[in-house]
């Protein structure tokens, strides 16, 4: 990598020398007629790729201009002048390949009555082609500083410090760039953009060089002459689809300077390059390659973060909580990958605006519809087909995006001889619809809808139907670029039905429904450069129908059971502040007060004190009328984290979190079973409380590497666990079957990441322990005879390696490697006889482990041709899942069969799985 | 349960290899625990309790616990009945007129030779329910690894109860079948042929074999205490079981809720582990406890039950394909029998009409007893 950069640098030096020596050899190529009638963007790319030239465009509003070429002898300067000057643009060239296009009219800003106004200053073009970085080394090459932007008016400059603020956006889609960095070369300090892409700098008047950058963009260097407070909005080109191979200097500041710990963010590009099983891109599978995220096994629904059960994760897609994140019982995640823009996983310090789950917040951001033009993309894999469209409804004002995905694999099942499989049917699908409206500079509205469905028929005896439906309406109001208000209405609904006719006399239908209604009001205040305050309120109304268990048909004599309905309100008020005490120390503190009320109408039981909860110890039955609070729990969450920057490439971060959780998953199986459902904390079941301490060291080294080491200790009280052998399908009174205990988890996570370059990826290792103790002293009840036992998701050692290699513009090779300790399991330790049959006697809970897990996946992504003038662009992704074909154990079990005890190992994907996925989109490679 | 097929459904799209392999992890730990296995019913079969120690996974064996003192007391601990050790580890009430009374409560008391003292919980003998019918239905099943469907007879039970209360059932099935060796034994070669007087004397056998499966069900969630079409065992045509005549004895035990919890847990633990969404296996302890050390795990159950029995007979079903192993007559080697050295003697020879003498690869082809049966039909056998 270093060598190639040196090469570029040397060649540039050589060009420089040539330019100076052969004076007058001006670069001004003759443009062939084949580029005639192209739209500007295509023309730009084509000409840049054919000739050794670059364009500098101050404000790229040329997109839809058609470039006309009259004859085959026109030089580029003439072409540009003849096409653009009539439109009010000015064209200039420096002679060695740089062409500058500017609007003739310069805008100057003033500060009328103390209000900030947009500054779009353009004055002189300062040609500094092949500029060397101030540090004097040869490393930067393609970074050109082309102009100085004057901000403010000198004569008004009575201020001793001026504030410079603005928004950083992606130039192609106009989306705010979150977590972008702004680096002031002269001071060797900087800041980052917030979730709206806004930044704020306080500087003395003067001339500065600002470097704008983000993970997904090309670095842009801007020289400013700051005369008084003003606004500078910056568009950054995305580096995702670049025709020119550009060496990108990484934003060195993110890893070290960000206040977040235990925070992972990945963008759509990264998600798409990671090899996947059966050709289905899957964000949850990608998340599992991050340190601290594991699962019980392949095909198991949900994921475990830092030794916590799956129900301690809150999953949001565009602000909508999703209660069932998977298709086909956990084999695939229920999200169309085309729609996903990025995801953020908070597993260490969870911001105070989030609450309600102890372990993690998984926040998926979806794409905003393209405000400029219509676009479509889609793909087919062996399992599914998907399609997405986006475009403007009113140009630059309102856009839409819509995507669907569905499976079509039933025909294959029909070919199988086994009647049980032949008679099985699998259908799943999901859809997303989003509208975005940029009402004006300060107001944005977003409407987002999500739906997913599964219909599964297994043999002729069991049918399942799962449905998710969610919607969010969000209004963003910016008071100026400093403060903003966010109001969000959220609706989410999850339901399932199971029809089971395995035994005719007991054929039944069971249903379940969870309804989540929420209002959020959030205010972000930036009173000064040092403080970012976030405050707000949130209220959730849960309406939960635990369902009915009904005979399926006349032949069934199953007794109908109504499990009843539940209602609760979870409200919260929160306040947090990110305080930059000095450039080297930042503290983030937050408080969140939760008030949870379990509401009637409901009958609840009272029990004898200090005795097991069962039908035998009931002392009283209390009836509460509709909406009467039955039990109210209040809890204060704390968030505290701090960062100490030791030097620009090294920092220490640490923090403490406390959270409360009022809804949990009823599950008595090792992996989540399809009919596991959510239950609210109630009169007899207490909410869970979790504390987490974490601390870490973060460093950047070399040019492109980020390293971190982070440790955590976590303690959860009132974890809900099931008594041995409890059968929850039939259990109406949940408190008879559960006990509440303690979860303890700790670990250390190490990661080295190379986010950029032809070869990029990461390596991480985690050591983690997680164990559960259930021993209710008062009632004398316990699980595992009162001994602490490893949790089902305890994987002490985990190694993940992810690597992407961009072999050429059209070929990307990717691979990943996963190793983890096998999950704990209970094995038999003795055999005994009953009535002549062999019976197994089992050890204490989770005393043993299944064999270790190891897998390598590879994929090759082949881009279609790079012609710019084509209707659609296609990409083939060939992938092999589990290249070594290792039969990784999902479970090990023993069975008594015909008087023999046999041990078995069950593997889900116990062989190589090849798949081909074809993705397409309208437009060319770069669009 | 069905869900275990799910990975197969997925994999059918790409590969056909099975994803379940035999596997034996190293489990070095071994627990030597007392095991109680006893049954008391309201019928007049002898009351037997077996005491043993659990054995290691690698070497399953019954390790009898001898020289213990056992007695049975009724509800108020008044009328004691004593057990006598008849064979090592097997204790029996020798007074064969003794039988359990419906509705009575019983408790088993065990004193080991080393002084440890155990007792069962008090168990009530539940009223038995009538079996209405036991019947077989021809059913075929796909089994991975076979190139043909598994064919056979699935047996079902129908019953009803006169009690409105929940009935908890445990079914124990015993199968007996008549079968034949492949060939008649006409000559025995011992350097020269000896003619066998009755060539079919070793050909027909009856074998009784317990069904190694636990069947439980309760009427707890049924609105009427009637069980219909409840599946019991499956007899396939992979063996000779159905080849001539088959008999199934169904013992229907009506047990207490706690006994049901024990047996149902054993049953589920055995079948459910193969599922993708299995429950955690657990240590299942029985109803016998050490009176001095409640923490000592004691395995097995002293089951007290009301019993009903039903026996059915089934002739070789028509319309079924049979796949059990058959012997191939060897007409070749028999021609060189004169040159066979004495270590191969005696050689069994059959005389197939029209084809002549033939040998076979194994004596099983001539002597049905080598497949586990006996030459005399059991007393209950009806032809």
Image (cartoon, coloured by chain):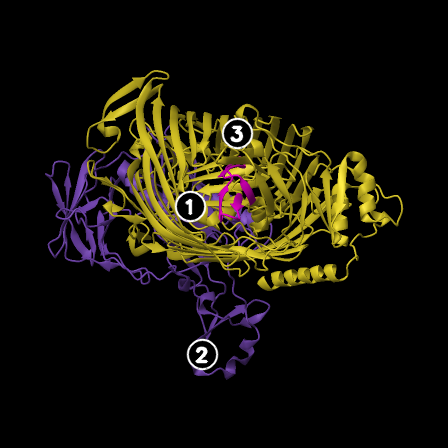
Chain colours: A yellow, B purple
Instruction: Specify start and end residues of the magenta stretch as a single range.
Output: A181-208
Which secondary structure lies at badge 3?
strand
Find numbered disc 1 in the image and state the secondary structure of the residue it sits on: loop
**Is residue A198 located in the magenta-colored stretch of the structure?**
yes
- Residue A855 at what x, y percent from top left? 50, 57
* Structural distance between the alpha carbons of marks 2 and 3: 80 Å
Say which residue appears at 67% left-offset and 35% top-offset. Answer: A389
Horizontal arrangement in the rendering, residue A823 relative to residue A495 (left or right): left
Query: Taking A640 as reference, is A836 above or below it?
Result: below
Q: Mark 2 highlights which residue?
A: B344
- Residue that protrudes farthest toward the top in the picture: A625
Q: Quadrant of the C terminus of chain A?
A: top right
Tell which subunit mark 1 falls on: A
Quadrant of the rendered structure where residue A153 is? Answer: top right
**Earlier sequence position, callout 1 versus callout 3:** 1
- Label 2 or label 3, whichever lies nearer to me, is 3
In screen coordinates, is A666 left or right of A427? left
Q: Disc 1, disc 3: CB below 8 Å?
A: no
Question: Which residue in the protein does label 1 denote?
Answer: A262
Q: Are marks 1 and 3 on the same chain?
A: yes
Q: Are marks 2 and 3 on the same chain?
A: no
């Amino acid at each position: 990598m270093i060598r190639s950069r040196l090469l570029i640098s040397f060649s540039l030096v050589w060009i420089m020398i040539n330019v100076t020596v052969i004076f007058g050899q001006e670069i001004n190529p003759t443009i062939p007629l084949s580029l005639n009638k192209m739209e500007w963007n295509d023309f730009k790319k084509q000409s840049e790729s054919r000739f050794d030239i670059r364009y500098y465009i101050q404000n790229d509003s040329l997109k839809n201009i058609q470039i006309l070429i009259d004859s085959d002898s026109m030089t580029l300067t003439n072409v540009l002048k003849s096409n653009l000057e009539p439109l009010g643009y000015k064209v200039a060239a420096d002679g060695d390949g740089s062409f500058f296009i500017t609007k003739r009219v310069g805008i100057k800003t003033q500060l009328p009555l103390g209000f900030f106004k947009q500054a779009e200053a353009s004055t002189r073009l300062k040609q500094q082609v092949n500029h060397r970085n101030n540090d004097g080394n040869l490393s930067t090459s393609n970074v050109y500083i082309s102009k100085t932007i004057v901000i403010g008016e000198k004569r008004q400059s009575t201020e001793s410090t001026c504030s410079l603020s603005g928004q950083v956006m992606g130039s192609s889609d106009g989306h705010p760039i979150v977590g972008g960095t702004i680096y002031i070369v002269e001071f060797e300090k900087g800041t980052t953009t917030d979730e709206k892409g806004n930044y704020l700098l306080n500087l003395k008047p003067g001339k500065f060089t600002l470097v704008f950058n983000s993970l997904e963009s090309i670095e842009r260097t801007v020289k400013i002459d700051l005369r008084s407070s003003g606004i500078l909005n910056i568009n950054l080109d995305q580096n995702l689809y670049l025709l020119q191979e550009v060496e990108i200097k990484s934003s060195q500041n993110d890893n070290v300077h960000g206040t977040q710990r235990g925070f992972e963010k990945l963008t759509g590009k990264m998600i798409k390059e990671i090899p996947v099983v059966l050709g289905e891109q899957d964000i949850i599978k990608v998340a599992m390659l991050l340190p601290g995220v594991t699962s019980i096994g392949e095909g198991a629904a949900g994921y475990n973060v830092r030794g916590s059960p799956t129900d301690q994760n809150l999953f949001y897609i565009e602000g909508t909580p999703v209660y069932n994140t998977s298709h086909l019982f956990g084999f695939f995640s229920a999200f169309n990958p085309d729609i996903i823009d990025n995801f953020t996983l908070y597993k260490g310090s969870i911001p105070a605006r989030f609450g309600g789950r102890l372990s993690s917040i998984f926040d998926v951001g979806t794409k905003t519809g393209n405000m400029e033009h219509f676009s479509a993309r889609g793909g087919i894999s062996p399992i599914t087909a998907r399609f997405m469209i986006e475009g403007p409804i009113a140009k630059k004002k309102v856009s839409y995006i819509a995507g669907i995905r569905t499976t079509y694999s039933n025909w294959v099942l029909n070919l199988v001889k086994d009647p049980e499989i032949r008679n099985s049917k699998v259908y799943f699908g999901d859809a997303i619809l989003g509208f975005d409206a940029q009402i004006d500079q300060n107001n944005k509205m977003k409407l987002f809808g999500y739906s997913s469905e599964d219909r599964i028929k297994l043999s002729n005896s069991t049918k399942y139907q799962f449905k998710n439906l969610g919607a969010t309406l969000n209004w963003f109001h910016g008071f100026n670029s400093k403060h903003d208000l966010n109001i969000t209405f959220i609706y989410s609904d999850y339901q399932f039905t199971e029809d089971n006719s395995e035994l005719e006399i007991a054929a039944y239908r069971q249903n379940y429904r969870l309804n989540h209604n929420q209002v959020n009001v959030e205010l972000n205040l930036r009173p000064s450069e040092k403080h970012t305050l976030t405050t707000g309120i949130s209220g959730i109304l849960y309406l939960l129908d635990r369902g009915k268990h009904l005979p399926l048909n006349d032949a069934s004599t199953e007794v109908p059971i109504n499990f009843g309905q539940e209602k609760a309100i979870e409200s919260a008020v929160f306040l947090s502040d990110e305080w930059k005490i000095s450039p080297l120390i930042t503290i983030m503190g937050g408080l969140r007060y939760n008030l949870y009320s379990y509401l009637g109408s409901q009958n609840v039981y009272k029990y004898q004190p200090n005795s097991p909860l069962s039908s035998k110890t009931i002392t009283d039955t209390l009836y509460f009328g509709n909406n009467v609070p039955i039990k109210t729990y209040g809890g204060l969450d704390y968030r505290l984290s701090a960062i100490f920057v030791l030097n620009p490439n090294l920092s220490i971060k640490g923090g403490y979190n406390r959270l409360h959780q009022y809804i949990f998953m009823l599950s008595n199986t090792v992996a989540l079973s399809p009919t596991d459902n959510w239950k609210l904390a109630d009169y007899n079941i207490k909410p869970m409380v979790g504390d987490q301490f974490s601390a870490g060291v973060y460093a950047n080294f070399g040019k492109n590497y980020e390293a971190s080491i982070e440790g955590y200790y976590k303690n959860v009280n009132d974890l809900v666990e099931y008594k041995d052998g409890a059968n929850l399908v039939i259990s109406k009174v949940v408190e008879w079957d559960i006990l509440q205990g303690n979860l303890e988890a700790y670990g250390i996570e190490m990661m080295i990441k190379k986010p950029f370059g032809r070869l990029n990826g990461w390596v991480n290792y985690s050591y983690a322990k997680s164990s559960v103790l259930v021993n209710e002293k008062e009632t004398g009840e316990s699980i595992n005879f009162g001994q602490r036992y490893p949790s089902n998701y305890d994987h002490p050692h985990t190694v993940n390696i992810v690597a992407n290699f961009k072999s050429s513009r059209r070929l990307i090779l990717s691979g990943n490697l996963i190793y983890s300790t096998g999950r704990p399991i209970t094995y038999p330790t003795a055999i005994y006889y009953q009535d002549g049959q062999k019976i197994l006697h089992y050890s204490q809970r989770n005393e043993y482990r299944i064999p270790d897990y190891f897998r390598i996946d590879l994929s090759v992504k082949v881009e279609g041709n790079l012609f710019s003038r084509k209707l659609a662009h296609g990409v083939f992704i060939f992938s092999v899942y589990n290249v070594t074909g290792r039969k990784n154990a999902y479970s090990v079990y023993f069975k008594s069969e015909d008087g023999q005890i046999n041990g078995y190992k069950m593997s889900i994907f116990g062989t190589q799985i090849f798949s081909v996925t074809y993705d397409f989109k309208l437009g060319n490679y770069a669009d | 349960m069905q869900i275990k097929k799910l990975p197969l459904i997925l994999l059918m799209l790409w590969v056909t290899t099975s994803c379940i392999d035999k596997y034996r992890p190293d489990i070095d730990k071994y627990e030597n625990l007392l095991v109680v296995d006893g049954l008391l019913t309201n019928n007049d079969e002898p009351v037997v309790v077996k005491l043993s120690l659990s054995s290691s996974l690698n070497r399953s064996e019954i390790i009898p616990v001898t020289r213990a003192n056992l007695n049975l007391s009724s509800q108020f601990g008044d009328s004691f009945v004593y057990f006598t050790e008849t064979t090592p580890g097997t204790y029996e009430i020798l007074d064969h007129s003794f039988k359990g009374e419906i509705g009575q409560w019983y408790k088993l008391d065990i004193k080991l030779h080393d002084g440890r003292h155990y007792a069962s919980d008090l168990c009530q003998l539940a009223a038995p329910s009538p079996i209405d019918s036991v019947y077989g239905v021809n059913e075929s099943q796909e089994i991975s690894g076979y190139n043909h469907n598994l064919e056979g007879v699935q047996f079902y039970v129908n019953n009803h109860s006169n009690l409105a209360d929940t009935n908890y059932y445990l079914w124990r099935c015993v199968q007996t079948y008549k079968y034949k060796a492949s060939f008649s034994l006409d000559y025995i070669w011992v350097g020269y042929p000896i003619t066998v007087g009755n060539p079919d004397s070793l050909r027909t056998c009856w074998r009784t074999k317990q069904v190694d499966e636990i069947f439980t069900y309760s009427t707890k969630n049924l609105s009427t205490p009637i069980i219909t079409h409840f599946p019991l065992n499956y007899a396939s045509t992979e063996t000779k079981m159905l080849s001539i005549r088959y008999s199934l004895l169904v013992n229907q035990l009506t047990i207490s809720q706690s006994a049901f919890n024990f047996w149902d847990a054993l049953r589920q633990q055995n079948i459910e582990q193969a599922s993708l969404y299995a429950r955690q296996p657990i240590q299942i302890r029985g109803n016998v406890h050490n009176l001095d050390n409640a923490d000592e795990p004691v395995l097995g159950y002293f089951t007290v039950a009301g019993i009903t029995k039903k026996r059915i007979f089934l002739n070789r079903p028509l319309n079924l394909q049979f796949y059990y192993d058959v012997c191939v007559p060897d007409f070749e080697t028999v021609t060189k029998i004169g040159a066979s050295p004495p270590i191969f003697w005696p050689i069994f020879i059959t005389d197939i009409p029209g084809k002549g003498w033939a040998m076979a690869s194994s004596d099983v082809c001539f002597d049905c007893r080598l497949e586990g049966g006996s030459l005399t039909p059991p007393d209950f056998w009806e032809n």
